[in-house]
Amino acid sequence: MIKPRNLAIAISLALATPAVSFAAPTLTSLEERLMAMEQRLQKAEDRATTAENRAEAAENKIVQLETRSQQQTPPATAAQTAASTAPAAAAAPVTASTSKIADGFEFHGYARSGLIMNDSAAGTQSGPYLTPAGETGGAVGRLGNENNTYVELNFEHKQQLANGATTRFKAMLADGQRDYNDWTGSTSELNIRQAFVELGNLPTFTGAFDNTTLWAGKRFDRDNFDIHWLDSDVVFLAGTGGGIYDVQLADGLKSNFSLYGRNFGDIESIDNTIQNYIVTSNNFAGPFQLMVSGLRAKDNDERLNPSRENDNAGDTGVHAMLALHNDSFWGLREGTAKTALLYGRGLGAEVKGVGSDGNLTQQAETWRLASYGVTPLNKTWSFAPAVLAQTSTDRYAAGDHYRWATLNARLIQEINPNFALAYEGSYQYMDLDPQGYKDRQAVSGGFWKLTVAPTFKVADIGDFFTRPEIRLFASWMDWDSSLDRYASDDSFGSSGFSAGGEWNFGVQMETWF
């Protein structure tokens, strides 16, 4: 049966058809023509329906592809979206995209390694602390005077959240080794030296705490500093604890506050591990730094201090440092310089490694001066002098004293962009009276060392602190013969190593990044 709509269309077409010269069609032929036209219209309608179905199927396909794409988005990216809408606590484990996490990882390291021998191609004594004064921190310079392999591997992850807060995690793996073999597991000192977390720029911290950084864990304090070419820290605060950096107490005045813990060992009589706690306030005003610490180690006075004169170690102490950080060579020329005066009493009398020596007496008292600088003399020469001096009394035994001073200087001469000659000279005078502590003998005298080190670098010879470097070296050192009798178990008490002059030769690499 012909549908009314199709019939109306057909009639309209028929009426609109112009007259032709052939005879008028019969009713039967007209129906046939209408029927054929209806079939054509039905086919057109079917084709339109098919096209519509295909379009709908295509839309469904697109939706499916979009859904699949969203489902295959890297987890961190989805987490980033969640972090922008979910509460901070829920979003904490995942806050950055995969690319941002990759960008947030950092790897830093320090390493030195080399060998040393005497002029008979035999093993020899060496080290920045090989003199009798070295037992109380008297360094004499490291160039051409090291035979160990030491490595630090630092892994860090940093990120910044949408609210502006930052996080930082750091772990340091370190090992020290004197064995020259390629496999040294039996003598390794492998250790996790640092493992801590920092939280910075917390948005709810305002006023004096705006832009501060909280931290907790095992770490070296951020603001330690050293004389690198002596291999001597000026101050080294480290241990396990927590604190806050950069509290803005006033315009131009920032302070750090921390609590560190260290261990001294066991007390045999009460079977207890001594824990030393160090509370520190470290304050900065312009180029000046004032650091003050208090120390407490309950029951440390019960631990045996193997001294002829005093059997008891201290259990409290104080430590202080006043430092000046120059952005010039002591105001004389281009360069940098740092100067520090340190004082400690009781457990604070180990002024370099704060809180690291549990054998100090309660009456121990130490003063220490450190000053050093670096300056380019011209286009091819650079100069780095240092002075380090210390006096300590009643340190381990009543009436003892340890006095020493080191003068050191390193010169670097650029030959070409990849080769330089490094020269280092050191002189140290010491006056030591241990009062029988560990069977040490009272001695006084001087030590001196001269080193020449042809040095290879890839670039920036004129920059004193660029690395890596590969050095060849020749060192000559000598000392007053009286120092040989200080102890039978130190370097100067070693067989075949005595005053009269000693040549050492070797090769070393050093790098950091």
Image (cartoon, rainbow, N blue to C red):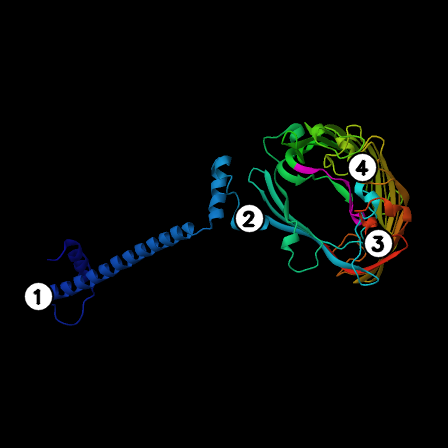
Q: Residues within 10 Å of mark 4 (few under 14, many from 20)?
A: some
Amino acid type shown at disc 3:
Phe
Q: Residues within 10 Å of mark 3 (few under 14, many from 20)?
A: some
Q: Name the residue under label 1.
A: 28
Residue 233, magenta (yes or no)? yes
Task: Judge depth for marks 3 and 1 and give the one in front.
Answer: 3
Callout 2: helix, strand or loop? helix
Q: In this view, does 157 lie to the left or right of 401?
A: left
Residues shaded magenta: 227-239
Q: Are marks 4 and 3 in contact (CB under 8 Å)?
A: no
112 left or right of 451? Answer: left
Sequence-wise, the earlier of marks 1 and 2 is 1
Q: Distance between the residues labelled 2 and 3?
A: 54 Å
Indicate the quadrant where residue 327 lies: top right
Q: Cα distance, mark 1 to mark 4?
A: 136 Å
Residue visible at 70% across and 59% down in the picture: 180
Q: Is residue 7 visible?
A: yes
Quick one: SS at disc 4?
A: helix
- Provide the residue designation for mark 2: 101
**Number of marks present in the image shown:** 4
Q: Residue 437 got which mark?
A: 4
Q: Quadrant of the N terminus?
A: bottom left
Query: Sequence order check: which comes first, mark 2 or mark 4?
Result: 2
Q: Which amino acid does label 2 sit on?
A: Ile
At label 4, the amino acid type is: Tyr
Tell me where residue 463 sits by quadrant: bottom right
Residue farthest to the bottom, as pictured: 22
Q: Mark 3 points at which residue?
A: 497
Q: Relative to the observer, which residue lies in front, 495 or 406?
A: 495
Q: Nearer the viewer, residue 257 or 153?
A: 153
